[in-house]
Image (spheres, helix red, strand yellow):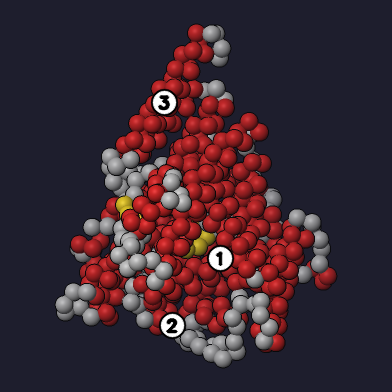
């Protein structure tokens, strides 16, 4: 055993990146819960945020301790696994569990908006609890799955998510606000790509955030266009002490709710996706030299989600993608501990809103762009050169998911603004796209559904083909056929306003048959190779 790992300047950079990412999740929760689920802003600030922040504190402290312990064991720095609220589950739980429950109850006689919002929140608590239990149970088999799955299959999935949902979103926002966002991006590139040392040893992430914040406020105070909307009035609105309150009684009362069990086909797949995503992120850390035990890492993630539900948060936690990016910044264990402590303070004091109004996202998102770039680069760097095509194949489902995200957001905006006829629902919109501008839109939906599973399986198939292990490729194709037939991937339901990913056994049977035919082709290739005397 060696001494404890020191705090580094890179920890400050890593803190800013992880803090901005988590702050975005909190702001999205506030907007969706008040806008779609009828919850007053004060309810979100006082009941949901304290529980969410304490779950973040517990998880971040554990992963910081784990990184520090591994550094002491090995004698070299380890970067803590990044941890925060699960973005995918956040949207899924609000759009397909909490909001529909609220809307259905609010329309019933005898249910006012306040009562409907409370029941919808309680149903969300149960969904969060079950998701955490699935994640904790996944710790029992996580290490075994990791050993048999090719590294390219695990890393390429993350690269697809990084390219679409992180880098493209924030790059587009950068060019929407170039007067504010391009200068911080230049600072980030100079720091981490050009290895420029700044005066007084200041961390590049801090300089980038301060630069963007100064530019944004300079434009706002001068009354010039080109910056985000900022104002001094109401800057500290919402601040005040908010202590967490246990929600065990609310959980218990909602366990028998039909709204929970009617939506179990959404809760279970989301829990399984969380297990797979966490597993991929642990593998990403090991590929970068930081080996962590998958079982304990997943169990603590699940336990933090259970704690969140018990303290009033409807939203699961997760091990984030991005470990390679924070490692390149030089972050160690402290950035994670600081992130947990920071959100505990700002949530319990109501300072999340004022903070977001002082530091605009445009000032800090360059750090997230760099994180996404490093994740994508790692997928190629940490795998054999012959597996590069498999990495590209594994990225495609994530890019498809991002493409559909843009389509769905455009549809929602068109309905809200009245640009579409009143009778146009999402199925009709998809039919219109298929007949006109995007004839392959149903293929986009099919590839997007359960994309974490399909990305992993497709990349694994490609790895085995590249290594000429055709029987193994056939086994992976059979696994893909089974997953499609069971509804874990490629299955979806079009509601009037959104796509609901749920387990619909048998719906994706054409895709399952296609995978079976592919398995037959691989077995035929194996037989042909044996006949020709090739290994």
Whether the residues at callouts 1 and 3 have beta carbons within 8 Å, the answer is no
Q: Residue 295, position in %: x, y?
A: 46, 47
Residue 21 numbered mark, or none: 1
Residue displayed at 40% across by 83% down: 42
**Mark before the other along the chain sequence, 2 or 1:** 1
Of tags 2 and 3, which is closer to the observer? 3
Mark 1 and mark 3: Cα distance apart in space: 41 Å
Q: CA distance from mark 2 to mark 1?
A: 22 Å
The answer to whether one can see residue 284 in this image is yes
Q: Image quarter for residue 420?
A: bottom left
Q: Residues within 10 Å of mark 3 (few under 14, many from 20)?
A: many
Residue 519, numbered label: 3
Tell me residue 501's x, y (percent). 35, 52
Point 43% across, 79% down: residue? 45
Q: Is residue 308 visible?
A: no
How many tags in the picture?
3
Q: Is residue 208 left or right of residue 470?
A: right
Cβ–Cβ under 8 Å for marks 2 and 3: no
């Amino acid at each position: 055993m060696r001494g404890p790992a020191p705090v580094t300047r890179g920890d400050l950079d890593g803190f800013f990146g992880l803090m901005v990412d988590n702050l975005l999740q909190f702001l999205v929760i506030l907007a969706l819960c008040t806008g779609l689920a009828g919850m007053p802003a004060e309810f979100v600030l006082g009941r949901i945020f304290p529980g969410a922040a304490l779950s973040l504190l517990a998880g971040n402290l554990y992963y910081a301790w784990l990184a520090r312990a591994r550094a002491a064991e090995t004698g070299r720095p380890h970067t803590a696994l990044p941890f925060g609220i699960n973005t995918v589950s956040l949207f899924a739980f609000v759009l397909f569990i909490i909001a529909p429950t609220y809307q259905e109850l609010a329309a019933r006689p005898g249910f006012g908006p306040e009562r409907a919002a409370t029941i919808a929140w309680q149903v969300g608590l149960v969904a969060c609890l079950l998701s955490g239990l699935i994640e904790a149970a996944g710790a029992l088999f996580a290490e075994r799955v990791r050993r048999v799955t090719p590294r390219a299959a695990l890393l390429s999935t993350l690269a697809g998510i990084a390219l679409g949902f992180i880098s493209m979103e924030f790059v587009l926002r950068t060019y929407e606000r170039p007067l504010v966002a391009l200068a911080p991006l230049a600072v980030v590139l100079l720091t981490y790509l050009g290895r420029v040392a700044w005066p007084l040893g200041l961390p590049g992430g801090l300089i980038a955030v301060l630069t963007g914040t100064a530019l944004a406020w300079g434009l706002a105070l001068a009354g010039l266009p080109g910056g985000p909307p900022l104002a001094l009035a109401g800057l500290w609105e919402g601040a005040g002490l908010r202590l967490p309150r246990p929600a065990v009684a609310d959980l218990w009362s909602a366990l028998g709710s039909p709204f929970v069990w009617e939506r179990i086909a959404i809760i279970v797949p989301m829990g399984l996706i969380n297990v797979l995503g966490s597993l991929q992120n642990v593998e990403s850390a090991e590929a970068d030299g930081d080996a962590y035990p998958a079982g304990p890492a997943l169990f603590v993630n699940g336990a933090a989600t259970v704690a969140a539900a018990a303290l009033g948060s409807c939203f699961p936690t997760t091990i984030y993608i991005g470990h390679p990016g924070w490692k390149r910044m030089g972050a160690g264990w402290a950035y994670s501990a600081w992130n947990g402590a920071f959100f505990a303070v700002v949530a319990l004091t109501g300072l999340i809103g004022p903070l977001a109004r002082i530091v605009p996202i445009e000032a800090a998102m360059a750090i997230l762009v760099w994180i996404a770039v490093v994740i994508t680069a790692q997928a190629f760097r940490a795998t054999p050169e012959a597996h590069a095509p498999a990495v590209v194949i594994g990225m495609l489902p994530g890019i498809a998911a991002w493409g559909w995200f843009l389509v769905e957001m455009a549809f929602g905006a068109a309905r809200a603004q009245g640009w579409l006829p009143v009778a146009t629902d999402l199925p009709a919109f998809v039919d219109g796209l298929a007949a006109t501008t995007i004839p392959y839109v149903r293929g986009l939906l099919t590839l997007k559904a359960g994309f974490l599973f399909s990305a992993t399986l497709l990349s694994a198939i490609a790895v085995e083909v590249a290594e000429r292990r055709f029987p193994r490729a056939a086994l992976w194709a059979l696994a893909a056929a089974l997953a499609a037939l069971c509804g874990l991937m490629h299955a979806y339901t079009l509601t009037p306003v959104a796509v609901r990913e749920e387990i619909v056994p048998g719906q994706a049977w054409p895709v399952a048959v296609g995978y079976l035919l592919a398995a037959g082709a691989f077995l035929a290739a194996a037989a042909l190779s044996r006949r020709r005397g090739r290994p």
